[in-house]
Image: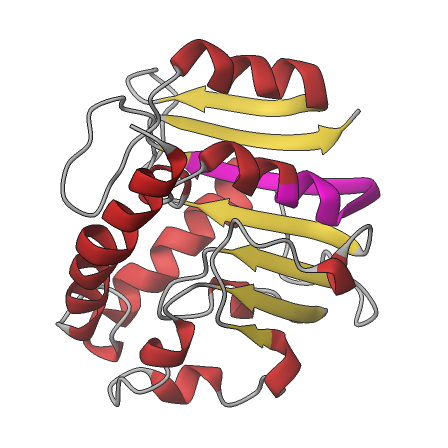
Amino acid sequence: MSQNNLYQEWENIHQPWELKYHQGPNFRWPSFETKWQFQWDTIFHEFAGFEKNSFSQEDILVDVGCGSRPALNWFDNGKKYNIDPLLKEYLKIEKINHFWNNFNEDQLISKQAEALQESLIGKASFVLCWNVLDHCFDWEMVLKNCLAYMKNKSFFLLGTDHSSVSHIGHPGIKDQSKFFKFFEENFITHKKIKLGEKNQFKNCRQINLLLCKK
């Protein structure tokens, strides 16, 4: 399938499904608060080893594919940027839009993850991309953008499924060998857990990585 066809499928089929999912009750809603907090305690602290005060107020944190609730609010400090193609629509969801009240307009970027945000190039101390790549139409471009946002001695936290089989909401990752080769060529792996390993954690994706750029 051509890149243009992949985009059209993503825009016309996968994205409407994604929006409808977030508009309905899910673990981001206040009624699931304990589950939401437990997930990010597990991912940020248990897996990645961060504390809530790991970053300073001057540090820039970027969530690529942030979804309908800001995970970066787990951290006490930092200037936090949120990128998602449906963000404008998510801000209209009454049950959860109050979670976005502490962000300036420039920190809410309603653009596809494949669109490079030039103002963030080389600025981020921390980049998050969790449960995003297999929802995108060009996973490689998303990873290139994440790499571009990172400054030296920064961290990239990635969790993703990587099935090559497309299903609704999930275009998938077709070229598995190219996918894993990208990490070998561009990142130093600090921590890695695969789904099914005995040290896997709750909310584990198929591959979970804490990375630094080479």
Query: Residue 213 magenta-drawn?
Result: no
Expressed as whole percent of the image width and height from the top left, the position of residue 133 reads 41, 39
Task: Judge by depth and name the residue closer to the eye, 33 or 93.
Answer: 93
Report whether 207 appears left or right of 124. left
- The quarter in which the C terminus is drawn is top right
Taking 126 as reference, is 9 left or right?
left
Identify the residue at horizontal 39%, vertical 36% (top origin). Answer: 3
The part of the image, by quadrant, that contains residue 68 is: bottom left
Q: Is residue 107 above or below residue 186?
A: below
Residue span colored magenta: 145-159
* Picture coordinates of residue 207, whole percent (x, y): 41, 25
Say if residue 164 shows up in the picture: yes
Classify residue 86 as left or right of residue 124: left
* x then y, percent, for residue 132: 40, 46
Question: How many circles with numbers are drawn on the protein?
Answer: 0
* Above or below 51: residue 69: below
